[in-house]
Image: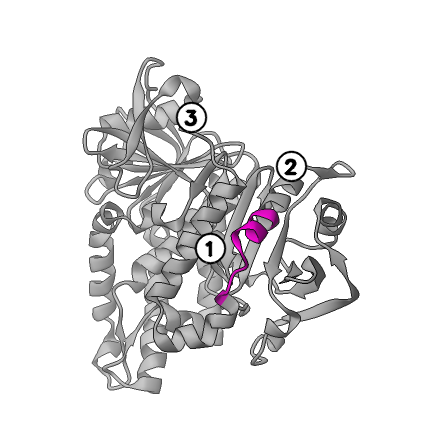
Amino acid sequence: MAHKYPKDLVFELLALWREGKDSATAEAKRKTEEFRRLPDFDVLEQLVSICYQVSQLREEERGLRFRLMLCEPDDIDRDGSGEQQGLFTLSFDEPRPFNEYELLKLGPSTDYKNSLIGIRYTRAEGLQIWGMIHSGSRWMHAIHGGSKQATPLPKALGINVVGPGRIILCRGLEILAQLSGGNIISPSTNVFQSEWVTRRFAQVRKELSMLHGRNAGSSTDHWAKIDPAFFPSLYTQFLKHVISTVRSSGHGGTVISFPAGMDELVAHDNPYIDVKYRFSENGARNQLRNVVLQITEVLARSCGKLYGPEYVAGWNDYVTLQTRELAQLDERVFKFARFIARMAGVDGAVVTTEGLEIIGFGGIIQGTMEMGGSVAKAFDPEGVQREIERVESVGTRHRSLYYLCNKLQNILGIIVSQDAKVRIVTWNKDMVTCWDLIPIDFT
């Protein structure tokens, strides 16, 4: 497969940008037309190519990570809604030229998590750097997990430089595509949105909905309904936070999820995995489930009072309706995610059920896949497009998980390498299959 470069990324950008415009309503097009307009292909290629070149340079032995946005200062926070969240711009008294040298010098002055470099384009002056945009860090919740509302940004072209040869293109806060390792990936490859993952966790969603329905408060007049999709949304944010915490640790780790009905097998001695630190059976192992049910209780009660009993509360309500009680419960969810992630720092796997009940950690898999074996590497969410990959290119941690997924074909594993690469592994169709995850997969 031929490697992709900045020109290929621009072609992908134009296709995705038009796709967004075609799917928009007439009113949405009117409101965002100015922000959505892109310059000519040659200008876009110059913009992306310069960012690509700078990504591979170093400034005083520092690698560069920065974000920029192609917009005017007046495009930022037009309605003033972002001011309270710290959104503001600082314009230079004279614009600077847009080139490798300027980005190399200016990049280290920006905090990747909190600020962007403002870029404008005119036919007379070409590309120029007009100043700085302070956005805050809430936009990163799309990658690392979280429920806070992101600071609003215009639907303008954003470029995030995250490492050598690694470029992310955005439309405002929406991630469109990433160039990484010579490949272009878009959110359409998100395995967490696949049908097989939805089917896998359907039982957990059904169980949580049933337990929520048994709450005594559900018989009152001020009790809204809960969208069943809320449960997988919250669980996805939780998993994102677990994965991002393990990635940032520099140690790597493995989390294995056993389906309903197999928790008894793994909770006791078995020929597949030896759990060194096994927790006793009590309610604390279901910590996440208990907190989620408390969240849905508060959400149903709060939305019921505001909108009535026929209202269906979902993820957007959870994000916007941040009462003190919900904020405390939200913090408990993500503290528990960090708690699980730290367990992965011990040699062996963290062992959970599909409902994220914690069985234990330090799980040693009793075997590894032979060096001559192979797995499928998937390129789409359902694993239809794939290629065969020999296991000799990976270490013992990967081969052990491949072995377990081959023996127990209904488990799911998440493995994080020391270099922060992430793989989802399970049995799919006729063989062990894996999906590579990068931050864009979480959006």
**Side of 179 where 377 appears, left or right:** left
Residue 267 visible? The answer is: no
Q: Is residue 162 above or below residue 214?
A: above
Mark 2 neighbour class, 10 Å CA radius: few under 14, some 14 to 19, many 20 or more? some
Mark 1 neighbour class, 10 Å CA radius: few under 14, some 14 to 19, many 20 or more? many
The residue that disc 3 covers is 397
Counting residues from the start of the chain, the first of labels 2 and 1 encountered is: 2
Q: Which residue is located at x 61 percent, y 65 percent?
A: 135
The residue that disc 1 covers is 175
Residue 358: percent from left, percent from top: 36, 45
**Rendered-image quadrant of the N terminus:** top left
- The quarter of the picture where residue 302 lies is bottom left
Residue 203 visible? The answer is: yes
Whether the magenta-drawn stretch holds residue 45 is answered as: yes
Q: Magenta-highlighted stretch: main secondary structure?
A: helix
Q: Nearer the viewer, mark 3 or mark 1?
A: 1
Amino acid type at circle 3 is: Arg
Residue 382: percent from left, percent from top: 25, 42
Give the residues in magenta.
36-46
Counting residues from the start of the chain, the first of labels 3 and 1 encountered is: 1
The residue that disc 2 covers is 56
Secondary element type, mark 2: loop
Secondary element type, mark 1: strand
Q: Residue furthest front?
A: 124
* Observer-nearest of 441 and 326: 441
Measured in 3D between alpha carbons, the distance from the residue under mark 3 to the one under mark 1, in whole angstroms, is 31 Å
Circles 2, 1 touching at the beta carbon (< 8 Å): no
* Observer-nearest of 7 and 182: 7
Measured in 3D between alpha carbons, the distance from the residue under mark 3 to the one under mark 2, in whole angstroms, is 30 Å
Secondary element type, mark 3: helix
